[in-house]
Image (tube, rainbow, N blue to C red):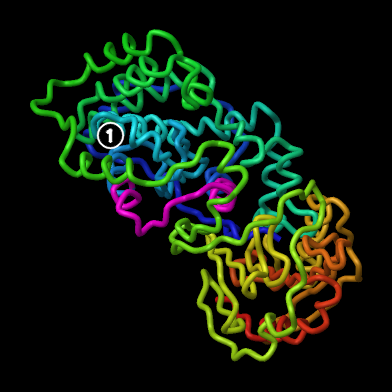
Amino acid sequence: MRQAMRGAWLVLGAVLLVGASTQSAWARFQPQSCKNSFTEQQEITEGGKVAAEVFKQMPVLPDSSPVSQYVRQLGAKLVAVAPGYKWPYNFHVVASEEINAFALPGGAMFVNLGTIQAAETEAQLAGVMAHEISHVVMRHSTCNLTKQQTIGTWAGLGQMVAGIALGNGALGSMANQGIGMVTGLGFLRMSRDYEKQADLLGAGILYDAGYDPRGLPQFFETIQAKYGEGGAQIFSDHPNPGNRTQYVNAEIATFPPRPNPTVTSPEFTKIRALAAKEKTYNAKEVQTGGWRQTGKYALVAGGPAQVIPAAPAGRGQGGAVGVRLSQSALGLNDRMVAYQGAGFSVSYPSSWQKGEGQNGSVAFVPPNGSGQSGIAYGALIDSVRFKTAITDANTLAQATSAVAQQMSQQNGGMQQASQLVAVTVGGQPGNAVELRGRSPVADGGSALVERDWLVTVVRPDGSLSYMVFVAPEPDFAALKPVFSTMVQSFRVR
């Protein structure tokens, strides 16, 4: 089961900036809206789940890194003047040598070290980031998904278990559907028309943030001069619309004159020098995953640098990875410690590690109970909101069955293994059902069966909280008392 990604439905409301600078940005350039089957709420939730996959599959510097802190501060300046819906933007740095940056639906942005090293001024780096922010503002990624008619697949994957792989693993499903890091996030590859829109809006954001807006086309000019159209990854994901410099300069000519716009800063010079000293990886090195054992990269947003468990090489889709944990490693006799989550509380074994998603989901696993292939031992807690509120035992049963069905559909070979039964969850009525699939753990060279225990309870607002407890078949009975204790400690609020 994959580490926690965002699962709570975060409702922010469609808030517009009302400052004069933002109004002028839209007055200068009015992008056409594109057909989009996603709500803002879905976009935030599902984009966060893909962001969690980025942390699993790419060497992301921890937020404590000076380079990460600088990029986050630079991003804050830009989003302060970005128009439209107030997405929960967050900014991260990837230790990749490729010159590229990408923003996910909902506002998570990843900037490669190679991009920071290639930028010659702060305005150029800010220009790339403003360009990416513009894709988020205009919702280009989910418009692409709508065109590809993949909304049902993507949203279904997200609602299933917050995108965390169970049994065979959601990663395989994502690969099959062309979604996620396995396929290079193809829905982030923009058309030339979308690129032009992002250039024009990005130039306005750059100007409103006090930067020289010429930094945006200058960055692309610099990269093209050094590497040619096909020499940098950024041109694969961001094709040149043609005449970029000319149309951006024409847009800039509509801006009121501004004396002494920011071109660069001593802080940029310092951070660029630090970035040049950081270890970077090429695409093959990122894929092979040796960086996971360096202890320099974060497993989740806001997480510390740590050794990230890597899956052994040679796993095909649905194949087994990893070995069984010893009984002593499972924390069966640990004292339980309290955790306060987003709208819930729960207790978990003190030796277990927690991984928090960006929208309220959380996973708890014993040491070495998870890796690149997902969670083999532990628990996931998340929530989901259905179109109709859960109001009684019948609608609770329907909601529980829907989650179980999605788990089965999205994880090849997983099947429901018991009838739905009524249970008590922290004193409240709930439901439980068991499923079985293929574990990412092997014993004696053979893949083990995985048991998944899905437990649900209705929340005060009519949405559903659910817990998925996971272990290989031979170890499930030993862990069941721990799982049961967690269930009885669970409280919604």
The disc labelled 1 sits on which kind of residue?
Answer: Thr
Q: Within the image, what quadrant is residue 154 found in?
A: top right
Question: Which residue position is annotated with label 1?
Answer: 22
Q: Looking at the magenta stretch, what is its main secondary structure?
A: helix
Q: Within the image, what quadrant is residue 63 found in?
A: bottom left
- Residue 461 pos. (x, y %): 59, 67
- Residue 384 pos. (x, y %): 65, 60
State yes or no: residue 426 in magenta.
no
- Residue plotted at (69% across, 64% down): 375
Quadrant the C terminus occupies: bottom right
Q: Can you see residue 232?
A: yes
The number of callouts visible is 1
Nearer to me, 416 or 110: 110
- Residue 77 pos. (x, y %): 26, 43
Q: In the image, which residues are magenta?
A: 45-71
State yes or no: residue 47 in magenta.
yes
